[in-house]
Image (tube, rainbow, N blue to C red):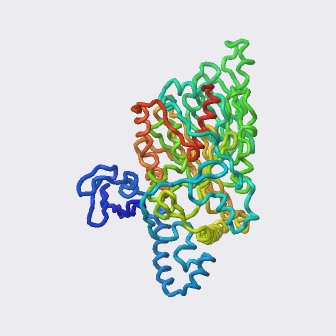
Amino acid sequence: MRSEVHAISGATYDDLGDGRVRVHKGESYGIFDWEGRWEEGDITRADPHLLQYVGGPDLPPGVDEMAAQLDAAREKAAQAEQETQELSAGDLAEDAYTGSVRDPRYGVRNMIMAQGQTTVAKYVGDPGRETEKGPRSKGISFHEVLAGDTYPERIPPELWEDSPMTGGVTRVPTERFTSQAWHDLEVEKLWKKVWQYAAHVDDIPEVGDYIVYDIAHLSYIVVRTGEDEFKAYNNACLHRGRQIREFDGKKATEFRCPFHGWCWEIDGSLREIPSEWDFPEVREDASHLREAKTGTWGGFVFINPDPDCEPFEDFIGSLPQHYAKYEYEKRYKQMHVAKVIAANWKITQEAFMEGYHVMATHPQAMAFGGDGANMQYDVFGNWCRAITVGANTSPQRGIYPDNEEIFAMRRGGAEMAREGLRQVMGDKADIFCDAEVLDGYFNNLFPNFHPWGCFSRIVYRFRPYGDDPDRSIMEVLYLVPWPEGEEMPPAAQMHWLEEDEDFTLAPEMGGLARVLNQDCYNLPKIQKGLKTKQDPYVYFSAYSEGKIRHFHELYDQWLGVE
């Protein structure tokens, strides 16, 4: 049975089975179902997200990597603590500097998890601090962490960039998340004109392989036409408009309409009009399927339906150079899960664009120090990034370790991370600084593509679900490298979950499934709340929600609204 200690209240949440959780602290207790309904006891209110995490749907045994690592860390910490009781003060100081696993604070794969025990501290609120670029969290900054990196010569210049979204708090109208009129405007002004991620090369590995890419009520066929050549066609017959393909396919040699048999080659050129004598002067107009522009980066295939669009390379800007060291094009698709969410696509993706929600939505993540308050946020043209600083600091709870302690923890964690990478990439693991192997980077390319950075394997995509502004499609991919000299493993096929199915029914996700359950637990309630909200706008903060503000600034430009 699962058990977690709440990092702020100090209450213990124990799984009782059958979806029930016992919350207790001292002599007080309460019993709840995992969705938050109180059943008995003098504790009558509990954290709904931790209730869900402890008592909600679970993964099959043996696939929750996070839980396994945590259990191992706790066991290692208990053993190490017993050993440290025998160490002299000088020995302990030396171990702290080298990051030896003899000291329970250091040397476990995740240096925050390495403590092996929950750090409980009451909420005090992040007081913030003034910097040259405006107010920031009081917690250690990413630049301060970089300054203590073990290998400063390995730090790429891109990591030193500091480019926050300018301006202050922004108000955005709620109707753009709920209105059919806004959805229709998006189709005309955005989805018909913007560069958008449509397929991964692993989806169409051989010439003639194709996928059907749907966005709102629009549909396209994305096909591999050469070793490194891809094309995208409007998925509609030029005769009577019948959809040419409903499903993905392999090794196509033609695209023939099932209705009357009009047929085009995979390069889009016309092959045949049956009874062409009955269609005089039509051949020229039907000589080629209507084609969208295509572009590729890092193993991803993008399309743009607008024939007059800007070049793909101009649209993505500096994004490729930030990923150059990490060779995304040499990763394979290990996992791909899709699910319909009962919320607008913008609401769904915004839940994954900031760390401000960590303290409230992922309370278990704070158990080992962090609360997401001191992330760094940057914007660059059409894309933006957030950097999760791997340090045992929790400004919302007044926990500020000494910088040298943080650096020592990071050294031990980084060395263990490199050892893991070395099994896949050999000596290439030694070209990366501590920040590249420890910290998290979750990035966004407008409008809906979320590739994480460095060695985070997550990629998200968010799309409207047909023409329903109250629903969206959320996709999660894992992209991972494989050992050089070995044959690439087979790519994962998309696993579709029904709207009422839980992420834990995709055990290939591992522990991320339960974390996503916490995120998506909020989303339908946001969609409903926006329709109830009396004030016709929402707020986005000046810094922590700067990436979302950046999205809405670009969104306004594309839709042509004030």
Question: Residue at the spot x=60%, y=26% of the render?
Answer: 562
x, y percentage for residue 504?
A: 44, 53
Q: Quadrant of residue 278 in the image?
A: top right
x, y percentage for residue 249?
A: 60, 39
Question: Which of the two residues, 447 or 221, is positioned nearer the viewer here?
Answer: 447
Q: How many marks on residues?
A: 0
Tell me, yes or no, if residue 508 can be seen here.
Answer: no
Q: Is residue 245 above or below residue 379?
A: above
Question: Which of the two residues, 283 or 147, is positioned nearer the viewer here?
Answer: 147
Question: Residue at the spot x=63%, y=28% of the render?
Answer: 192
Q: Quadrant of residue 119 in the image?
A: bottom left
x, y percentage for residue 394?
A: 51, 60
Question: Which of the two residues, 15 or 284, is positioned nearer the viewer here?
Answer: 15
Tell me, yes or no, if residue 443 can be seen here.
Answer: yes
Question: Residue at the spot x=62%, y=70% of the render?
Answer: 404
Residue projecting furthest to the front = 130
x, y percentage for residue 509?
A: 51, 54
Question: Residue at the spot x=51%, y=55% of the render?
Answer: 126
- Asked if residue 395 lies left or right of residue 238, the reply is left
- Which quadrant of the figure contains the N terminus? bottom left
